[in-house]
Amino acid sequence: MSSEELRRVEVMARVKSGGLKVGDAGEMLGVSYRQAKRLWKRYRKCGAEGLRHGNAGKPSNRAKPKKFRRQVLQLVKRKYSGDEGSRFGPTLAAEHLGAEDGLELAAVTLRRWMLAEGLWSRVRKGREHRRRRTRREHFGELVQMDGSFHAWLEGRGPAGCMMNMVDDATSTTMLRLGQEETTWAAAHTLRRWIEEYGVPLALYTDWKNVYQRAPTEKEALRGEVPVTQFGRMCEKLGIRLIGANSPQAKGRVERSNGTHQDRLIKKMRRKKIATYAQANAYLAEEYLAEHNQRFACAAGQPEDYHRRAPSRRELDRIFRLETERTVSQDWVVRYDNRYFQLERQSRYAPTRGKVLVCEWEDGRLAIEYRGKEVAWKQLPGAPGQGAVRRPRPAKRSAPTPAVDHPWRRRYQDMRVAVVAPPEAPTLVRVATSATP
């Protein structure tokens, strides 16, 4: 019996013992006098069992037919079951049963059936308690960005990185699958967001060299703030970059990654998607609209904080790599181990002048001098006349000294020995006879 029914039994027992009147019992139970009389009549006739609900222990009149339940569970076993990493949860399985099989069913009911059949069991992981940060009040006030490395295509294609942008106020999502978390991957995702919704006020990222980096020792001594290529793009758009010091700080996008790693992977498995291009097409055409409609919520305040999106031409001038280079005396610029000969603008070359080398995602190059684009041509080799640098002749090896060469003699052997002078010749006197 329920707690309400037990309370009624207690009150009616007091009426039976003479401690209460039927009207007082109705006041205590919060029912009318007529209803109290009905309860008292049933209690006198059947006792405590008379106050029990008549449908207790009986199947509900709104219960699904047993045949329908068996059909649903057979489909779940055949199409949406598996190991813990690949099986569909009750909510996702209920969605696909309605969309693909035409069987409308509440996720709560399906969960109860799956638990009874042993097709679903949720293991809760113990986590450190952290206070959840409240959402921002306005759409576009803060957008979180992160790259999630995962086997998104499972065994059908290569592993990749899913670039994910989530609005902090509404959980609106933008996704793009690529190979790595590079500057171009982040820039392409941000540009799609701007074209769709506008320019947000702030971007919440982690401390990776793609977004932000710590200053070097020389930059710290000079007081310079390091700016990455992506950071420069955000500066031109007026977007404030905020670095998160822990994954929990940007928990909104981290939890969103977990949702996509469950739902998106299974949906792409059903579509047999095996390449990045197919995945991005599916994201743009079907998945993102359905996901945002289901999981996005209304912002706390109605005002949209996104600024007007620049024109396509302005975005092209923003989303590019810009590198400063020095012009040599013969109007040659070196960039990425390549040499570019600038067309002469005057009689004198801008000795030690600075130019800006601009590179786009598709490999196009442009060189700007004092804000204006200048003509150039690429040299096939080293700077100067454009000729390929000739290989240097091989160095001749020094001749090997002979065995008795003075270089090979020791110092002791090289000392000059003192030689005594030769003795003087002895004069021999020869006697001669006198001439008569």
Image: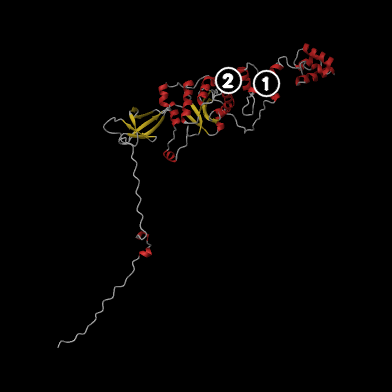
* Image mark for residue 252: none
Closer to us: 283 or 195: 283
Give how far across and how far down residue 121 sits, in percent: 67, 27
Left or right: residue 371 versus residue 307 is left
> Dot 1: few (<14), some (14–19), or many (≥20) neighbours within 10 Å?
few
Residue lying farthest to the front in this orientation: 436
Of the pair 369 and 399, the residue shown nearer to us: 399
Residue 404 drawn at (x, y percent): 36, 61
Looking at the image, residue 420 sits to the left or right of residue 234; the answer is left
Most foreground residue, 258 or 277: 277
Q: Secondary structure at mark 2?
A: helix
Q: Earlier in the sequence, mark 2 or mark 1?
A: 1
Considering only vertical position in the picture, is 218 above or below 99?
below
Residue at (33%, 30%) from the top-left corner?
A: 377
Give the residue at x 55% y 27%.
Answer: 156
Q: Which residue is mark 1?
A: 74
Q: Position of residue 37 (x, y in %)?
A: 80, 12
Location of mark 2 (residue): 294
Looking at this rendering, what residue extends furthest in the bottom direction?
A: 436
Q: Is residue 309 left or right of residue 71?
A: left
Residue 101 location, x and y as percent? 62, 17
Amino acid at dot 1: Gln
Q: How many marks?
A: 2
SS assignment at label 1: helix
Amino acid at pointer 2: Arg
Residue 122 shows up from this direction: yes
